[in-house]
Image: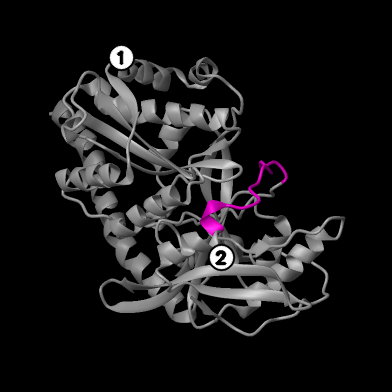
Amino acid sequence: MATAGAPVPLSDGPVERDRSADYINRAPTVAGISQKRIAGFFDALVRPAQEHEFVDLMLDRISVGRRMTFQAVAGPQPAHDRIVHRSRNPIYLQEWWWEVAGGGRHQLVAVFENGREVGRLLYFPRTRHSMGLFGFTEGVHAPWTNYCAPTIEAEAGDSDAARQGDVAYELARQLPRRISYRLTCPHFTHDAVLAAFERAGFGIDTQRSYLVDLRGAGIKSIIEHLDMSTRQRYRKAEKKLDVVAIGPSMFFDLYRRNLAARDKISYHDLSVAESLASTCLSRGSGCVRITAAKAKGAPGDDPRSYHAAIACLQDDAFSYYWMSTRNINATDSDIRNGAVKLLLVDAIAHASQAGLVFDFDGATTRGTSELYRGFRGTEVNRYALIRKTLPARAIAIVRNIVTVVPRLLARRKRLLRQLAGPCRLSWRKRD
């Protein structure tokens, strides 16, 4: 592990949250188009969105016709209503986790006060290639790590917010400016920390996640908490499947088998994830729990009898839905549609009995959001701290334009075909 920069003392400046650089409040017009809308358009071009988020945004917000209008992208909402239940020692921020996940390649910036470390931030330098031509380095969380955030020593009293902001600002200032960053922070990140990174030139994006807080509830209450569709699929799967505990080797054998059946490969090295799960078990702290949905009455040594499996991580406050795999070729629709839901209900019940909040650990697609809403969890925002170098911003603009133009042309052709159909029909009626 490398440490960036020398020890930096704390500064004494006040924390002020200034969003004026990110959101335009005044909206004068140029050639009939609001500058606010223009700014929103160019912000959408360069902001580090999810893989196809920009294309969807453009297709939804551009009206093809004689005049084109643009809408500003909404910024992160105030955090006054978000859940403040927090972990004192998140598993994703622990040193041993980063040693295994990062393979010793992770970087550290730290702030010291009177020779004592009061704040630190771990990140993983990753090289990405865009359009097969350009390569650039960005600081992100380590593989198989779903968030990273500044770890700042808390202080009792009213001055804690100002102190957190000061430490976070010094951490942000130490991050090398030659690379880009996208650092996803948990929902309980302090407002003062977010404000400090904004002052240091970072933008803030959001990522949805869902929490189920049913601590102390029994399995009956948890099932009643589900929406009707999820509850029905759970009950059908319960009649045909048993929930059994399995080890990391079995889980990752199933994971690789199911990937191969779909002709896909993992986006991260699966051997690293297996090492993380094995390390969790060897520590004896109960920080990982792996379960599988097995056909009732099937022999235990037959891998074909396992239709789904999930792995959940645990720390002092949360149980995280870390990984999952399922057999999409199951012939029984009750098993195919309900196996993962059966395992998730069991995981929520286990977390509730352990006094933990169940965290679905991020919802990156529309499909996963719909699945998680079926468990009637509370929607929360995780916060991505983003800073891009000038070359990375230029590459993002080019990539988005190259991606969106064919999609726009294809949509316009479909629209013209749809309009041409009724026209031909009306002329035939006249004849």
Which of these two is toward me, 54 or 387?
387
Marks 2 and 1, Cα distance to the nearest angstrom?
Answer: 55 Å
Across and down, in percent, residue 353 comes to 56, 27
Q: Magenta span has 236? A: no
* Above or below 185: residue 197: below
How are the residues colored?
one colour
Residue that lies at the very extreme toward the right in this rendered image: 158
Q: Secondary structure at mark 2?
A: helix
Across and down, in percent, residue 289 comes to 42, 39
Q: Is residue 249 left or right of residue 180?
A: left
Residue for point 32% across, 72% down: 130
Across and down, in percent, residue 271 comes to 29, 58
Q: Main secondary structure of the magenta part?
A: loop
Q: Type of residue at label 2?
A: Ala
- Asked if residue 17 can be seen in this view, the reply is no
Residue for point 48% across, 40% down: 360
* Above or below 56: residue 103: below
Q: Nearer the viewer, mark 2 or mark 1?
A: 1
- Asked if residue 245 can be seen in this view, the reply is yes
Q: Secondary structure at mark 1?
A: loop
Extent of the magenta region: 80-93
Residue at image mark 2 = 39
Residue at image mark 1 = 239
Residue for point 31% across, 62% down: 403
Q: Is residue 29 left or right of residue 179?
A: right
